[in-house]
Image (spheres, grey):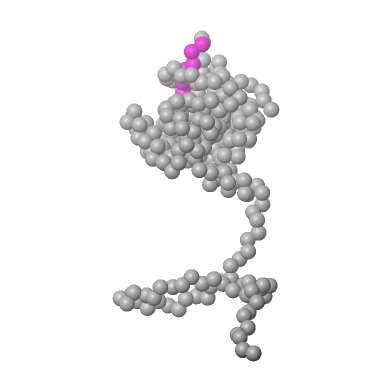
Amino acid sequence: MTDAPRRAPKFPLRLDQMATPRRTPVKPPHPAAPARPPAAPVAAPLLRPQQPLQHAAELAARSRAPTGLGMDSASVRRRMAERLRADGLRHEALLAALADVPRHRFVDAALVTQAYEDTSLPIGHGQTISKPSVVARMIELLLDSAAGRRGARLARVLEVGTGCGYQAALLARLARQVVSVERVKPLHDRARDQMLALGIANARLVYGDGMLGHPPNAPYDGIIAAAGGESLPQAWLDQLAPGGRIVAPVHDGGARQVLVVVDRTEDGFERTVHEAVQFVPLRSGLVR
Ligand code: SAH
């Protein structure tokens, strides 16, 4: 009878075997390199419990590859910002926000390839996300108010008409706090999810009738409307801070809409009328 060495059984493993840390082989240091301090003891790998479901969904949304855009979305976005600069946009912080905020994440998957063209796109429920050049123009007007010129950032901005949330995401880069009101519940819900997925913490999305403004957070340094009414609601004027500015499309008495800017000065309100625009109608009441 030969004395064959006994092999250690593979299974079941003892608890201390399972906890054995895996060490990666360390290459000997280069002769010229200074001696390394002794390696710290490697901790046993931790078993991670599963993430709660809502976190998993959030993480999945965050890491989702931009369909149809691949890894190039940042350069496509930079080009969009450069086009806007070439067209005369001068506000550096706004240009940086335009180059940064992933517009394709706010549009339907089928429209992703058009996300960085200067075009408005449908977002469902009969609504549209405005053209980047129009969004940029309106925000630039907003930032050019007395309040905007005073400091680096506007304190508080109210947006009426969240839609998909793209403009709110831009504003969140340029103001300390953004309050954005949407009257169509499914649009509000989707925009809120997107803000969460993008980690935008200073935009407060409200489901409500923006014609009433949003009194709990008033007064606002800026009020920007993404939908055009027959006139400016009184609530917006009431909720505007001194030095603040409203930028909104308003009907000019007929079918035409124009961009209207209203500044609150020490003496009252000053109104200026700008170019013709085309926005979806401002409507009162809520849609479930
Ligand atoms: N800023 C948006 C554009 C949305 S389109 C974006 O970046 O996508 C205009 C939005 O205004 C629509 O979603 C419409 O439902 C909303 N709207 C119209 N009247 C409103 C009101 N009274 N209160 C709140 N939202 C309103």
Q: Is residue 256 in view?
A: yes
What residue lies at 46% left-to-right and 19% top-to-bottom?
277
Chief SS of the magenta region: strand
Picture quarter containing residue 19?
bottom right
Q: Nearer the viewer, residue 225 or 214?
A: 225
Question: Which span of residues is magenta-colored?
Answer: 255-263
In percent of width and height, residue 86 lies at: 32, 31
Image x and y of residue 241, in percent? 52, 32
Query: Where does residue 118 sit, x and y in percent of width and height?
Result: 42, 27
Picture layout, residue 260 above or below residue 49? above
**Residue 96 versus residue 252: which sits nearer the camera?**
96
Q: Is residue 271 something one can see in this rendering? A: no
Task: Report if residue 38 lies within the magenta region.
Answer: no
> As drawn, which residue projects farthest toward the left?
32
In the figure, 197 relative to 83: above or below? below
Q: Is residue 185 left or right of residue 24?
A: right
- Residue 177 x/y as whole percent: 54, 40
Is 205 on the left-hand or right-hand side of 147? Answer: right
Q: Residue furthest front?
A: 1
Q: How many marks?
A: 0
Residue that appears at 48% across and 13% down: 256
Q: Identify which residue, 128 or 30, lies in the foreground.
A: 30
- Residue ranking furthest to the top: 254
Say which quadrant the C terminus sits in: top right
At x 45%, y 38%, the residue is: 69
**Image quadrant for the N terminus?**
bottom right
Q: Residue at x 57, y 39 (%)?
A: 194
